[in-house]
Structure formats: C-alpha cells, structure tokens
Image (tube, coloured by chain):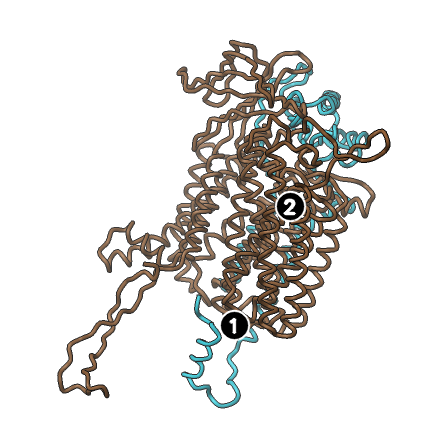
Amino acid sequence: MTFPRLFLCATTVLFLAAAMSGSVQAQQGAITAPPDTGLSPAQTARAEELGKRVKCMCGGCDDAAGMCTHSGGNFAGPCGVAKAELKEISAAVAKGQSDDQILQAAVQEYGPTVLVEPPKKGFDLLAWVMPVALPIIAVLLVWGVVTRWRERSTTVPADGPPIDAALLARAHRESGEGDE
Amino acid sequence: MDIFGSFALLLALVAAVYAFVAGIAGIITRRPLLIKSARNAGMAVCVLVALAVATLEYFLQTDNFSLAYVAAHSNTALPWYYKLAALWSGQEGSLLWWTFLLSIYVFFALFLNRKRHPELMPYVGVILAGVQIFFLTLNNFIESPFRILGAADGTGVMHMARIAEGSGLNPLLQYPEMVIHPPMLYSGYTGFTIPFAFALAALLGRYPGEKWIHITRRWTMVAWTFQTIGILLGAHWAYAVLGWGGYWSWDPVENASLLPWITATAFLHSVMMQEKRGMMKVWNVWLVFSTFMLCILGTMLTRTGLVSSVHALAESNIGGWFYSFLGIILAVCIVAWYKNRDYLRSDNQLDSLVSRESSFLFNNLILLAACFAVLWGTLFPIFSEWITGNKISVGAPFFDKVNVPIALFLIFLTGVGPLLAWRKTSLDGLRRNFAWPAAVGVASGIAAYIFGFRNFYALICLILSVFVTLTIFSEFYRGARVISARDHTDIFTSARELTMRNTRRYGGYIVHFGMIVIFIGIMGSAFNKDVERQMHVGDTMTIGPYSLLVQNYDEDTNANYDAQRATMEVFRDGKSVMMLYPERRTYSASQVTETIVAVESSPLRDLYVVYSGISPDTNQPVIHAYLNPLVKWIWFGGVIVVLGTGLAMLPNRRTGIVLRPVETRISEPISPEGAVAPAMAPITHRASLNE
C-alpha cells in the first residue's frame, strides 16, 4: 500500500473508530447527597444515570430530569415533575427492572419525547446513521473526484502558437491576478 | 414622536426599493448617474434606520409605555444600560437592530468601494438592497416596534393607553454580557450578507479575475470574528447566569449560531485553494451562499418557534416570510450558478493526495460533516414528527456523541494540514515535520494515563492538542531561526518579524493555537464534579480541594429586584482563601427568580457556587457547588483566536526593493538631456509598506 493510501486509510479509521465508540457525554460526577431511597450506592448511581437519560417534562425547562435546575423557578433544583420522574425511576431500579424496561415505561407514560436521545430504531435510527454515513459517502465521493482529477491531469501539449511571455505577464497584470 | 420612527422606517424601505430598482435599471442601461443614485439610496438606508433605532431607544430611556414594545420589555427601575439592551431583547426590536447592523455593513461596503470595481458594485448594491427590502418589510408591516397600545373609552373611541409601568426586561438578560453579546452575534450574522453579495455579484456579472474572492475573504473574516466573539460571549453568559454549571447545552438557538460559523470557517480555508491554485471555485461560491442561507435559517429558528428552545424570542407568524425568503435566495443562487457554471471552472487539478490541497479538502469535508450533524440533530425532531407523527427530543448527549469524534479529527487535521506542502509532500518531509511532535503527543498521553487520566476522548484530545501545539510552535521556530541566523537578532524578535511578513499564515497558526486552547478547556468538562446539599449557617461541604463554610444568609432589596444572598467562606488546606456570595434575585416587574452564580476562576479549575434557594420539600436553604476544570482556557483561547484573526487581517510587511545610485565613470552613455544617467543598482532592504 502506498503512503498516501495508508495515510488516508489511517485517518478514516481513526475517525470511524472515534465515531463508533461509546458515550462521550460530559460526566457530571454527581456526588449529591442521595435522598433516603433505600437503594444501594450502585443502584443510586444507576438511578442517577437513568435520570439523565429522560427529560424533565414540566414544559418550563429543557433539562434532563436528573439535571433539572429549572432556570427562572423559585428553587434552582429539580422541579416537582422532575422529582416525580426520578422517584419512579428509583422505584423501578429498586424493583430490579432493566434500563430498557425503565426507559420504556417512561416512554409509555410521557411519550417518546421523554428520551433525551432519539431511539435507535425505526425512522429515528436515521438520526444516528446520517451523521456517520454522510461523511463516509462524502469521503468516497472526494476520493473518486480526486482520482479522476489526477488521471485527467496528464500534461497535454497546447494547440496553437506559443504565447509571448511579455503578453502573458501583461494579461496577468491587467486581470489583477496575483495581487492581494 | 412614534410617527417619526415609523416614518423613518418607511422611508428606509422606499430608499431600499429605489436602490434595488434603480440598480437593476443602471446595470441594464449602463447609465452611470442611475448607478450612482442607486448607491446613494443604499447608503441613505443606514441613516434612516439609525433614526428609527434612535427613536425607539429614546422611548425606552424615557419610559414611554404607550409603545407596546417598551411596555413589554422595559420598566422604570431598569438601569439605563439595560434599557439600551432592551432594544434587542424582543422580537420587533431585535429585528430592527438586525436591519440597523446590516445597513451599517451595506453603508461601508458601498462607501469604501465607491471608486472601485465599477463592473461589480452595481450588482452588489442590488443584492444588498434586496436583502434590506426583506428585513425592512418585516420591520414596517409585520413586526413593527412602533406599535401604540390603544385603549377604548366609554364611547368606543380608541385612545393612546396611559400605562405607568412596563413588564420589565427578561431577568436572564439583565447581565452585563447581554449588553454586548447580541450586538456581536448579530454583527456576525448580518456581516455574512456582504461576502454573499460579492460572491453572487461576481457570478452574475461574470467579474473577471480573482479580485472578488479577496474581497469576499476579507469581509468573511470580519463577520467571522464578530460571530466568534458573539458565540463565546453567549457561552460565558450561559455559564454565569443560567446556574447549571455548563456553558453549552446544544440548544437550537445555540446551534443556529454555530452553523454559519462552521461553513464560514470552511470557506476561510478553502478560499486559499482558489487564491493559490485556482481550484474549488464552485465549492467556495456555495460555501458563501450556504453561510448566508444558514444565517437566515438560524434567524428563522430563533424567531418562529419552529423548534423549541429555552432562549428563542417570542413565537410569531413570520415563519412564512422566512420560508419564502430562503426559497427565493436558494432559487437565485441555483440559477446564477447554473447559468454561469463555466465561469467557475478550475484552473488546476490535484497533483497528490498528500498535499496541502487534499488537507484542505478533508478539512472542508470534516467541517461540513460537523455542520450537517448539528443541523441534522437540530431539525430532526421536525422531520420525525412529519414522518412518524411522534415528537422526539434530540438533546445534548446526541450532539456530544456525534460531534466529539468529528472535532477530534478536525484537531488532527489542524496539526497536519498546514505543514503539508502545496501540490505534493514527500514522505521524508512528513517524517521530518511530524515525527517528534507526534512522539511527544503520544508520550504525554501515556504519562496522563499513568497519572489517572482515564477518559478515552479526553486522552485523545490531550494527545492531539500536544501534537498540534508542537507543530505550530515548530513552524514558528523553524522560520524564526532562519531570520535570526541571517539578521543576528534574538529568536523572539525574529519570530515577530516572521509573523509580520506573512500575517495571514502566522495569524492563522495563532488562531489554530487558540482553538486548541479552547478544546483543552472543553476537554476539562469530562472531569466536572458537583455537590448539592442543604446547608445551615455554620455547615461545611467539601468539593475537590475546597471546603465551603456558610457564614450567613441575608436579604437585600432595591427597586428592580429583591435578593437573597449566601455568604460563604472558602478554605483550602485549612486556610481561608476567599469569600463567595452566591445570590438569588426575584425581579419586581416580572416576578421571575434568577441565580447570580459566584465563580472563583483559576487556570486549573473553577469553583462555581449556586445558592439554589429554599427547598420546597424541607424549607431549608440549599447550596449547589461545582468544580469545573479548565473552563478558563475556553475564554482565554477565545481571546487568542480573536487576536490571531486580527493579526491575519493586517497587511504583510514585505521585503521591498530600493534602488540606490552607484558611481559611474564619465565615459558612460549620456542621456539625451546631456545629464549623466546614474546607473541604478538594486539593494534589498527590509521595509514595511505601512511605515
């Protein structure tokens, strides 16, 4: 494999590897004093994580329930709606339900808009596929175009008499090319 | 008095229509007087809109609440500087402000070029007038800021309403940065109209040569700088006011400001391909067109309630106008490009895949991928609702997942691209330039991992940031060393000389370095911590190396708001290091409560303390403290980016050629006038063209 191809492959692989890997959401290392829910520390952490994956459905803010600060409200913390959602999640975690079950229950109750991310199924899968697929298609297109350019760029002798150098310089000068 | 403002706006519309019609007539008939009068009308729009703006501001400053806009966005207790900001705080006022900034740009574009580019400027004037007509129509007939509040008397006759007090300015906007942020951002948005007009005009008029692309690039840089400042000020405002500990939440309005910034960044890179190699002309023209259309789309998103956003302006029915305007622009651009596509034929082809040209291609590709990802995520809820009937959310986690890899790849290209040679780069050259920066980058990544740095993306970001920073500094060092050896100057003087000789290239490197500093700051968010706790006077909480002791809670009141304040002493290693005063304000006019965050910022970390108020559950005061690493780097990086852009806009200091007379013998040929013609010998001399 020639170096240019190696270079292109390496950069594309790097990009794709990065694109395919897991979550990058800034981890809020929440060490908030947990309310007395009867959950173990591991369950509390899971409930907090799930709380960040559902939206506060109060309609007055656009925060995740687990990060609701309810800007403009009397208290800069989870509003009543967010607290109710978090309580349901904690109860479901305590019952031993899976993440999927808990999120599905939230969707059943509030509709698909409750999830902070589009679901990875049906039409909504497109939300995830397109930002990865389109750059790949674009890279292939550019590759194709560049290859065609390079094939075409073999030197072909110009027809007609040679152009006088002074005339060419004057043409460049008058067309304003080359001056910044 | 309101009549004065309305009349000025109406006259401005008439002047814009005249500039449009007379401009077209001037182009067709080629009558210089007609073209000149069209230009003068275009410049007069600025004066007339300025009168309307001054009138509205006068109403705001004098608390004239008979005007609906003043009653809705101001009150008597508001300080004068927030009354100034109230001008762009509502739909009608901000649209007027938009038109005003656009008219200033138009004035300068027409005035500065009044004796230049006679073939190009009439087209530019017509296009600019067309854009102004759209906004002035909205100002005059759809969203007039001079609407009077009326009240009917007992007989049903309408009179001007006499209102003693207004509803007040949105408390979120009562912050010093909000006085600067919107004008900066709007200067960016509106500024992109000028490069659009020049690019479209060059295409329509088939303007010979590449001069238009130089003009377009300069105006784009001006608008890009304002947009950069505006975006960063907005992020800083969100950080300081919203009280959730972050600065960017991927809200549709935030995304809207990022989209044209990304395409303009792509253009500022790919334009070099056209200037140096005569390539990518179609691409460049479409980047300029897209940037302008994204500005209009962004304005539409902010103003029409098309997507839900926490800081969108009031929803209104102007969506149809924006759809139509966007449709017209798109149609004009497609027709202009299709009819003149031969004008944009490339002069050269790509010689090698490992070259500056290909790095620009990839840079553009990745930037457009980022732009698409942001646009796609922003609009996807609408598509999903259309197709499936279900409303879904696309929140910050989606944008983080999609955009972080793209951003990392972009950082990689920032290091690689500028060091590749034009046309073709040899393998040896690559090794020479990249080997040790890459090695040091990887070594610092390994060291960071050993010291407990375990976030995958943060590690990659660190490695790439070190790599890019070293490549940038090695570029400066290599160039400066050559000058230093020749001129016997120290390395810093030589580096300055090097920069001033090619401001665009080295200014560009400084901008890249600033972006790296910003990315390092963003990387810090992977290590944020927060603690929320009920705290009575005398209670202590610990976060990172700090202990926070509540000393007191007190209250304060003034005409504008009532404040509840916590007084907190911060300890580090047992020693008192500072006092912090987080606050909550309830504004009298709107009865809305807002946080005033107390931030102690250092290059390593921000201690960010929010007084959450009294918990409705326990009736006890709650303090929420955040430890946000490296946030200051974002603001500092922004300053570097702006300084670098300013430097890149300066003209180069060139190596000039000065001729000096040399002694000649008397036997040399004598000139016709009988005088001895001194032979001239060139000497090189370093001189500034600006000196």
Q: Name the residue nearer the viewer: B23 or B556.
A: B23
Q: In the rendered image, is residue A17 in sight?
A: no
CB atoms of marks 2 and 1 within 8 Å: no
Tell me where residue A148 appears, x and y as whole percent: 59, 71
Chain letter tied to brown? B
Q: Chain of mark 1?
A: B
Using a 10 Å C-alpha cutoff, classify the residue at mark 1 as few (fewer than 14 neighbours), some (14 to 19) or many (20 or more): some
The quadrant of the picture occupied by the N terminus of chain B is top right
Q: Which mark is residue A101?
A: none
Residue type of the residue flagged with mark 1: Gly
Tell me where residue B602 appears, x and y as whole percent: 43, 30
Which residue position is annotated with label 2?
B96
Marks 2, 1 in one chain: yes
- Label 2 SS: helix
Residue type of the residue flagged with mark 2: Leu
Q: Chain of mark 2?
A: B
Using a 10 Å C-alpha cutoff, classify the residue at mark 2 as few (fewer than 14 neighbours), some (14 to 19) or many (20 or more): many
Q: In the rendered image, is residue A21 in sight?
A: yes
CA distance for labels 2 and 1: 37 Å
Tell me where residue B141 appears, x and y as whole percent: 74, 48
Which residue position is annotated with label 1?
B209
Q: Nearer the viewer, mark 2 or mark 1?
A: 2
Q: For residue B678, which quarter of the picture?
A: bottom left
